Image (cartoon, rainbow, N blue to C red):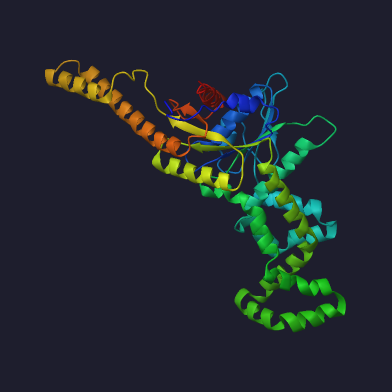
Amino acid sequence: MATPRSKPLDLDALLDDAATRIVICCGSGGVGKTTTAAALGLRAAERGRKVCVLTIDPARRLAQSLDLTALDNTPRQVPGIGTDGGALFAMMLDMKRTFDEIVEQHAEPGRAQAILENPFYQSLSSSFAGTQEYMAMEKLGQLRSELAADGAAQPWDLIVVDTPPSRSALDFLDAPKRLGSFLDGRFIKILLAPAKVGGRAYVKVFSAGLGAVTGVLSKVMGAQVLTDLQHFVTALDTTFGGFRERADETYALLQAPGTAFLVVAAPEPDALREATYFVERLAQDGMPLAGLVLNRAHSSSAADLSADRSLGAAKQLTESGTYGLTARLLRVHAERMQQVARERHLVRGFTSAFPGVAMAVAEAQASDVHDLDGLRAVGASLAGTVR
């Protein structure tokens, strides 16, 4: 498929470059983002890189495509993949398990247990808004720190991240700011104040400063819920700074050399509209955009036969009452050429708005991608768009 005014995106050069350490695939739902991430990870591994593919999308497609029975919070090696030292690992983010690991790692043993058993923590770690995005930041930071560790050879030197569908895929860019706002919020400071005083003064300050407030909150939230919240905040107090610091470090890592964002889209109005949002948002935050991956684009080997000519010929054959099968094939070809024209028009609108954004195109596959051979075909198609 032609991509007017767009410059080619050489994905093989990006994947082969040892300086490329993190590739983040983002885009709206249903555009083949998970497939793209897996295909790029597989291609990089088979070209000699040690790759870990991290999916934040809870769908099971990645495990199925990589011929694994399941994925969890621990990177699993895909058997039989990689030559010349290459290897492929894959994992799926477990939000709660990642949160538990952070608590276990950074809190004292007794305090860690108190946090893990706290009902408010159990709710927060499972369903609190923004927790998934923050845990994604944490997990990426963990994987990258293993990457950067000295000593023994590392299991991977490239991380490919498959983000959640829709605009929430970029919510992790706001995670440090939102976490800091929550932890520095007035309500949290009030809950922490009594514990910071300690001893007999704890009771005095608690009674004087919180008596009226907690009385009202107890009626609204329930006394036990408020107590659980106070205990949770007190137990986690010494760990808050670490959360904020690590989130800021990971955010800086996303902007650093060696990180590349790929916006994944399909040649459809909604998908390209979302791609526009992603490109603008990444530019606003100073994130390194490598380019756009256009998935499931259509083309025709008989492009010199236009839709109008094809329909005209089909009409003549139908009126003559001969070559009925040929007439039907001509109509199918006309529909394909019309679809190609629509897609080119949509892509032209995007490339006109962002002429500096490089593009790689994956041709539409004849069937759904559900195995390693299908992923190889997608990777080869993307690499083949370089002119």
Q: Position of residue 165 (x, y in %)?
A: 52, 45
Q: Position of residue 130 (x, y in %)?
A: 61, 55
If the image is split into quadrants, where does the N terminus sit?
top left
The residue sitting at 63% across, 81% down in the picture is 216
Question: Taking 213 as reference, is 5 above or below it?
Answer: above
Question: Taking 189 as reference, is 354 above or below it?
Answer: above
Horizontally, residue 230 falls left or right of residue 260, namely right
> In the depicted view, which residue is nearer to us: 120 or 254?
254
Horizontally, residue 367 falls left or right of residue 256, namely left
Q: Position of residue 317 (x, y in %)?
A: 17, 18
Horizontally, residue 360 falls left or right of residue 323, namely right
View extreme (top): residue: 323
Q: Position of residue 305 (x, y in %)?
A: 29, 19
View extreme (left): residue: 320
The residue sitting at 65% across, 21% down in the picture is 47
The residue sitting at 64% across, 77% down in the picture is 217
